[in-house]
Image (spheres, helix red, strand yellow):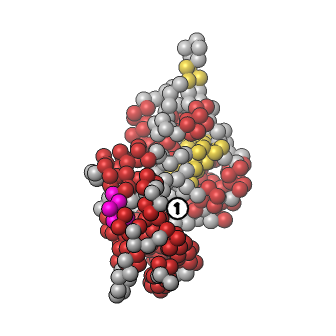
């Protein structure tokens, strides 16, 4: 039996999706696949959900209503470009929220139309957990009784945020984080970093391959340096202003870049629409861009704080002789120095301080005040009484 590309190291996905694949009967005949009407692909970012969704769509769309199997390479090319008429690929709007308008025409109403070329129609919804209540309730009706030619694939790295009624109507396909060694090899190939740095980024991603890739890329070194500077400033009891400003500024730049992308996408979309729709898109784009700025800035700052917390955690690991568990494996000399300047209990208190700051920032927009307060608390946690 063939294996879908991307499931080679995903045993659960490979087992669940096997039924969807066509196979050869003992007499040499063709046995069509029997896919579920709806799948929920769940797993951490970068675990391959999107890749397997494309591969599944290619297999399903390669079969026509009369049983003819088309050239998979040609179908795959059209799926990759999202130009196949029987494939609909839905992403949340620029605000990061999937609204009723995102699913109403593209999915809920479109499922009533029979396939144009293939035996089936495939609908893929990225970041399905971002659906607001209105969108989720509209989609729920479609999931309950879809036409027999429809296959819906929902992708999510936060399935717990989906309505239980949505999850219960999908067949779950679990994707595990990439093995550490495999991810490190990929980072070396993709970003050209050395072996030790690749391993550090793979570990620092904590299962998130997209974050690991970002850390190995151009923005990764400054982000790591800023987080390390904040931690080491506290450990070494350096005087003067704590260096959290670089962390805050980098997050702000990431947010600004995200807002620019949203505005550009909205502008390109509006140019293809009638006047009435164009005005609506332009009106919504400003609010969407503001939400995107806020969302990306918060995410970038949270990632930086997580790196900072891991530095304290790694220094504690070094202090107790557990260097094999260190995440910052390319900074062992610095971690050894820091581990010798304080004790394990103080370092672990610092981990708690950083984690509490992360939780507070999710509820409070005053980033700079929170970061300044965190620096004061870190100094207190490390002070010898």
Asked whether residue 196 is in view, the answer is yes
- Note whether 13 is above or below 71 in the view shown: below
Rendering coords of residue 128 (x, y %)? 58, 56
Q: Secondary structure at mark 1?
A: loop
Principal secondary structure, stretch drawn in magenta? helix
Residue 211's quadrant in the figure? bottom left
Rendering coords of residue 53 (x, y %)? 51, 44
Asked whether residue 307 is in view, the answer is no
In the foreground, 235 or 248: 235
- Note whether 208 is above or below 347 in the view shown: above
In the foreground, 213 or 124: 213
Rendering coords of residue 241 (x, y %)? 36, 86
Identify which residue is drawn at 52% across, 61% down. Answer: 92
Identify which residue is drawn at 50% across, 48% down. Answer: 177
In the foreground, 135 or 258: 258
- Position of residue 159 in the picture relative to residue 223 (left or right): right
- Position of residue 99 in the picture relative to residue 251 (left or right): right
Task: Sort mark 1 into few (<14), some (14-19) or many (20+) by Cα contacts within 10 Å.
Answer: some
In the foreground, 41 or 193: 193
- Give the magenta part as a residue range: 330-335
Rendering coords of residue 194 (x, y %)? 28, 51
Identify which residue is drawn at 46% across, 55% down. Answer: 322
Residue 154 among those drawn in magenta: no
Residue 334 among those drawn in magenta: yes
- Label 1: which residue? 92
Identify which residue is drawn at 50% across, 31% down. Answer: 3
């Amino acid at each position: 039996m063939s294996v879908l590309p991307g499931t080679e190291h995903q045993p659960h996905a490979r087992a669940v999706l096997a039924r969807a694949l066509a196979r050869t009967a003992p007499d040499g005949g063709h046995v069509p696949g029997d896919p579920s009407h709806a799948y929920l692909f769940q797993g951490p970012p970068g675990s391959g959900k999107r890749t397997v969704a494309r591969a599944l769509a290619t297999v399903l769309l390669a079969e026509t209503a009369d049983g003819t199997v088309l050239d998979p390479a040609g179908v795959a090319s059209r799926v990759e470009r999202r130009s196949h008429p029987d494939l609909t690929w839905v992403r949340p709007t620029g605000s990061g929220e999937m609204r009723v308008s995102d699913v109403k025409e593209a999915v809920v109403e479109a499922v009533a139309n029979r396939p144009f070329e293939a035996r089936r129609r495939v609908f893929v919804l990225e970041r399905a957990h971002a659906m607001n209540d209105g969108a989720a309730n509209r989609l729920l009706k479609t999931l309950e009784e879809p036409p027999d030619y429809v296959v819906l694939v929902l992708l999510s790295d936060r399935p717990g945020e989906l309505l239980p009624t949505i999850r219960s109507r999908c067949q779950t396909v679990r994707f595990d984080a990439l093995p550490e060694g495999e991810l490190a090899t990929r980072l070396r190939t993709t970003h050209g970093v050395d072996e030790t740095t690749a391993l550090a980024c793979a570990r620092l991603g904590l299962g998130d391959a997209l974050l690991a890739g970002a850390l190995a890329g151009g923005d990764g070194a400054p982000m790591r340096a800023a987080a390390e500077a904040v931690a080491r400033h506290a450990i070494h009891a350096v005087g003067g202003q704590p260096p959290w400003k670089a962390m805050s500024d980098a997050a702000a730049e990431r947010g600004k870049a995200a807002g620019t992308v949203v505005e550009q996408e909205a502008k390109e979309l509006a140019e293809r629409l009638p006047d009435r729709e164009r005005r609506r898109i332009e009106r919504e784009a400003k609010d969407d861009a503001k939400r995107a700025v806020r969302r990306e800035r918060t995410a970038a700052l949270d990632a930086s704080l997580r790196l900072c917390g891991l530095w304290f955690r790694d220094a504690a690991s070094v202090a107790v002789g557990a260097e094999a568990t260190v995440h910052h494996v390319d900074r062992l000399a610095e971690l050894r120095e820091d581990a010798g300047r304080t004790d394990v209990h103080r370092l672990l208190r610092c981990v708690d301080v950083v984690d509490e700051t992360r939780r507070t920032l999710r509820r409070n927009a005053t980033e700079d005040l929170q970061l300044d307060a965190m620096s004061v608390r870190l100094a207190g946690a490390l002070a010898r009484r």
